[in-house]
Image (spheres, helix red, strand yellow):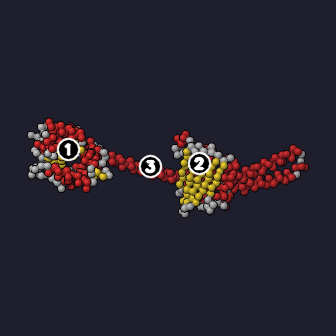
Amino acid sequence: MSTPVTSLAAQTHRHNSQSGAHVVQFYSRDHYLIDQLDRLIGSSLLAGHSTIVIATGEHRERLSERLKKTGIDLTLAVEQQRYVPLDAADTLSTFMVNDQPSETRFFEVFDRILLKAKKSSNRIDLRLTVFGEMVALLWSVGKTDAAIQLEQLWNGLARRHEFDLACAYPSYFFDRPEHAESFLKVCSAHSALIPDESYTGLDGDDARLRAIVALQQKARALDSEVAEHKQLQLELEARIKTRTQELEQAQDQLRALSRRLLQMQDDERRRIAFELHDSTGQLLAALAINVGLLERHKASFSPQYSNLISENSALVQRLLTEVRALSYTLHPPTLDVMGVASALQWYVEQFAERSGIQVELDIQKDLGRLPRKIEIAIFRIAQESLANVQRHSGSQTALVRIRRSSDISLEVSDRGGGISPDKKIARPSGVGIGISGMRERVRELDGTFTITSDPVGTTVRVTFPLGRKIV
């Protein structure tokens, strides 16, 4: 003959001579929980004992209806304080501090409630039963740590008072693999566990044994699946790590190549500038002298040749001026000799003359000389930024500011229309090749680079640390 599964009432009152049971009932549907509470609370009240029910309003109402149907006079039980219904949320609020149960407040509240319930009865053998849903309320809003802490506080209260405690959790609170650890913590906080109706509703030992075997098979299959997933995860992580390292190496190589290209570009600009100045410039200067000599004796030539000599003299002078300007733009000699402040002063004047954009140059007076690579980087970034102002912003003014303290900072700003939304969509970083070069120059020198843009203008800000050795 099969043995019935232990009910919440039977488990809670399994030994009438003892007190201190802390039972947890798992359930899938509310009506099953109400059935269990009806047996637990009903048997206690019919036996003349006292009960405290700390539950949600819905569960208290449904339990009251069921108890009344069994013939229990709840009105009298409440008047005699043998039945004490309390709202779970309201009671919880009396001892919660910063989303955690306060041990001091918890004991103050329930010492008073339990002592009052015990004094209401003259029975020497009074058995006090408490049912609570406060832990389930905490769990339902994700405060699992607070719920576990509250379970432990109930166990501590049981060492101060004699009572039996029952609580309940919906089974769906623990329906995912990641809930396993918290589920074990709940189980370890209780002296007895009662499975939900999917197990207790089975008819006979044979059906229950078959259910246990099926669950064991599912557990083993799940363990195997979890192990396989972990192995796949490890393999995937290893692949990701390898690919990440390869990507980082590729990025390092790309940055090294970018730095090398920038260095080659600077070297080539310097070489071409020197060639233009020392070779082409000298040849043009000699040609200008020769044409000048011809121009002094142009009166001895016919009017036709005399005019050609004058035109050629003007063309040679113009060409000489443009070659010198191009040489200075490629690499100003003053950048090496006098520093970035002097080089930018000359460049800004030439830029304003060519573009028609008024540029305010605000350089700290005691700037002094800087490491060569920083001076080159500042000059090239300012040069590229002003070129972008001319090409894209539509602004008629610009500002170049340089400041020095514990670091060196450069700011180039305009009052144009900013970077258009179309360009931001096409290039999410909001930069072109020139600005990418700026970023690489800054990265090489461990600096910081930012661009801010809105409908009233764009600002490029660069900061380089000083005091470090620059190779």
Q: Which residue is mark 2?
A: 434
Q: Position of residue 201 (x, y in %)?
A: 17, 38
| SS assignment at label 3 | helix
Tag of residue 243: 3
Q: Amino acid at mark 2?
A: Gly
Q: How many marks?
A: 3
Disc on the earlier residue, 3 or 1: 1
Q: Is 361 in front, or is 422?
A: 361
Q: Position of residue 403 (x, y in %)?
A: 59, 58
Q: Amino acid at mark 3?
A: Arg
Quadrant of the image occupied by residue 455 = top right
Q: Is residue 244 left or right of residue 172?
A: right
Q: Position of residue 216 (x, y in %)?
A: 22, 44
Quadrant of the image occupied by residue 55 = top left
* Mark 3 Cα shell of 10 Å, populated few (<14), some (14-19), many (≥20): few
Q: Is residue 182 visible?
A: no
Q: Amino acid at mark 1?
A: Pro
Select label 2 or label 1 by which is in front.
1
| Quarter of the image where the N terminus is located | top left
Select label 3 or label 2 by which is in front.
2
Q: Which residue is mark 1?
A: 85
